């Protein structure tokens, strides 16, 4: 088995997909005709978005994301953390943590999207010198 997709519950999948394409250099994938479900291409695993309303109609009761009290995070890896942080902020992301060099050999920064999801922008981990 392998991880195929992760689905986040959002108010507007179309708006969220537009934001992720601008902020994180991903491409839109499938978007349903009604716009209540859509995907962005992130490599082997797809990042998907389903409307909160659709989930309620399916008998689920999704909660709202809260970056100040997250239960998970999404991470985008890049060689240019500062440049990609600036791009995400210009696209409307909200700053949570500035660029920081971590003791385990990684550079990180954090933002939150318009839905409240915590997103890490990070470099690959390198062995400390």
Image: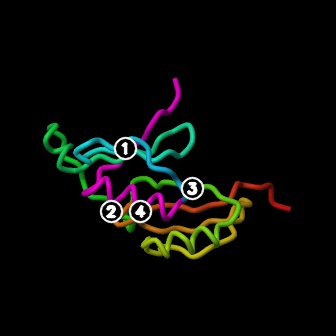
Q: Tell me the element at label 3.
A: strand
Q: Residue 2 lies in magenta, yes or no?
A: yes
Above or below, 53 against 129 in this view is: above
Earlier sequence position, callout 2 versus callout 1:
1
Above or below, 2 against 89 in this view is: above
Task: Please give the residue where the numbered disc 3 appears in the rendered image.
Answer: 76
Q: Which mark is residue 19?
A: 4
Instruction: Please identify the quarter of the rendering in which residue 126 is found.
Output: bottom right
Earlier sequence position, callout 3 versus callout 2:
3
Taking the image as shown, residue 101 lies to the left or right of residue 50, namely right
Taking the image as shown, residue 17 lies to the left or right of residue 100, namely left
Task: Please give the residue where the numbered disc 2 appears in the rendered image.
Answer: 115
Span shown in magenta: 1-24
Q: Tell me the element at label 1.
A: strand
Q: Which mark is residue 7?
A: 1
Disc 4 versus disc 2: nearer the observer? 4
Mark pair 3, 4: CA separation: 14 Å
Mark pair 3, 1: CA separation: 16 Å
Q: Tell me the element at label 2.
A: loop
Above or below, 12 against 99 in this view is: above
């Amino acid at each position: 088995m392998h991880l195929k997709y992760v689905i986040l519950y959002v108010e507007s999948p179309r708006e969220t997909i537009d934001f992720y394409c601008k902020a994180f250099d991903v491409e839109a994938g499938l978007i349903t005709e009604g716009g209540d479900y859509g995907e962005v291409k992130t490599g082997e695993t797809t990042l998907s978005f389903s409307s909160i309303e659709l989930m309620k109609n399916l008998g689920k009761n999704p909660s709202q994301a809260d970056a100040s009290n997250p239960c998970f995070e999404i991470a985008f890896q890049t060689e240019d953390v500062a440049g990609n942080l600036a791009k995400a902020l210009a696209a409307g992301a909200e700053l949570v943590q500035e660029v920081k060099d971590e003791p385990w050999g990684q550079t990180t920064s954090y933002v939150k999207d318009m839905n409240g999801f915590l997103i890490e922008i990070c470099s690959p981990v390198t062995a400390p010198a």
